[in-house]
Amino acid sequence: MEFAVREPGRLVEELDERTQLISLLRDIALASEAGFEDEYLAPIRQLASWFLELPASPEHHSDPGGLLRHAVQSGYFALRLAEGAVFGGGLPAERRRVVDRESRRAAFLAALASPVALPHRFLIVSSPDGEVWSEFSSPAPLAQWAGERGGGYRIGWRHAPSPFVRSVAVWLAGNLLAPHWGAMSRDVMLGAMASVAPEDKPQGQETPLQKIVRQALAKSAEAAKRCAATQYVPPESMVVPTKEQLMAQASPPATQQPAKAPEPAAAPEQEAAPPATGGQRGTEPAQSELRLPGGSPANPLGGLSPALRELLEALAEDIKHKEAVRRRVSWDETGNWLLVDTNLLGAYGMSANGVASALRKAKVAEDGNGRSLRIVETVGQLLLPRAA
């Protein structure tokens, strides 16, 4: 597929318009507007000039622009994870405050730069004349390299990925963000460089910074496994995590107390009907009563978390507008339950099993035939309105 070189700053703006990642970073960076511009936006723009609209890998972030999104998303997760870490614990208080601030930014930069070698592992990027862009091309940023060769570039997946060489990734990251590494103290900078492009699993004893970067990259990849593998799709049709979903995934899950059952009404006429008798298992309660605490007939999702509500609303939009999605949901023979392909639930930034478990706990769904989830009628009508 062929692309024209685009202005890196505009690519960053479009990324924020789609994902609000820059806004999320600004909220947690603990930096002034000028400091945020220099310490966070500047390296992101530099990265955009390096990546342009390349994808990350066949397994995740495989859409145009996916590599930049993966990098910035990883940086965001790392910055959130660093909030709960302890850096410089044995140092005097004043020095510890400096090291803590530097280490939070080091976590962001190390995660941001870690994907820098992915294009050379999974892609063949060439000029219109067939010259191949490599790790050792000069100039190194793709925007400059392609700009000097006609202003366009072609990309295709390798039949087999090149071997992972961490030293090359660290070398590229060091060159890419050289001014930003140098703005930190020597010890923090060395720790950051030792955290770039980690292995998928811990290799011996990890420093807090190494653990944060490894977990941030894994979180970003997990959030994007929904991307179509080994092929491009139009960017506007890609589902990206919402701001609320990213915030929820970046933070450790809060311990929740089970919701208390509503107190039974005192009036006799408000008592529940007796259970059904006979050989059958019992009559299902009226579906209109199956609402969450906090829900209402107008909004039965009112008791769900914001992330789950956003997910179901996004699913409803896709069911309405995308035939391929609509084919994966259907009403059962009774008309009381909407059957949803369980794997489909994993296409919106959260794991399919996690979504299914949360809906079951909320008592708006139950297991179907092993491959599907049965959604109660009140919620099912929001997803796929049934003809009268």
Image (tube, grey):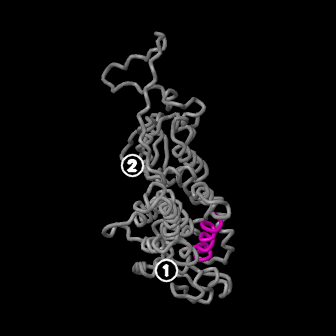
Q: Where does the magenta region start and end? A: 36-54
Q: Is residue 305 above or below residue 274?
A: below
Estimate the x, y position of residue 263 in percent, counting from the top left.
45, 20
What amino acid type is highlighted by mark number 2? Arg
Q: Nearer the viewer, mark 1 or mark 2?
A: 1
Q: Which mark is residue 382?
A: none
Estimate the x, y position of residue 294 in percent, counting from the top left.
53, 31
What predominant SS class does the magenta segment belong to? helix
At label 1, counting other C-alpha atoms closer than 10 Å, the crowd grade (few under 14, some 14-19, many 20 or more) is some
| Residue drawn 40% across the image and 78% down it | 164
Q: Which mark is residue 371?
A: 2
Residue furthest to the top in view is: 268
Judging by the rendered image, the residue that carries numbered circle 1 is 120
Residue 58 is inside the magenta segment = no
Spatial CA span between label 1 and label 2: 37 Å
The one of 126 and 48 positioned closer to us in this rendering: 48
| Residue drawn 48% across the image and 65% down it | 60
Secondary element at tag 1: helix
Estimate the x, y position of residue 301 in percent, counting from the top left.
54, 37
Q: Find residue 146 and report its image quarter.
A: bottom right
| The N terminus, quarter of image | bottom right
Residue 227 appears in the figure: no
In screen coordinates, is 161 left or right of 326?
left
The one of 158 and 380 positioned closer to us in this rendering: 158
What amino acid type is highlighted by mark number 1? His
How many numbered callouts? Answer: 2
Q: First in sequence: mark 1 or mark 2?
A: 1
Estimate the x, y position of residue 207 in percent, counting from the top left.
38, 66
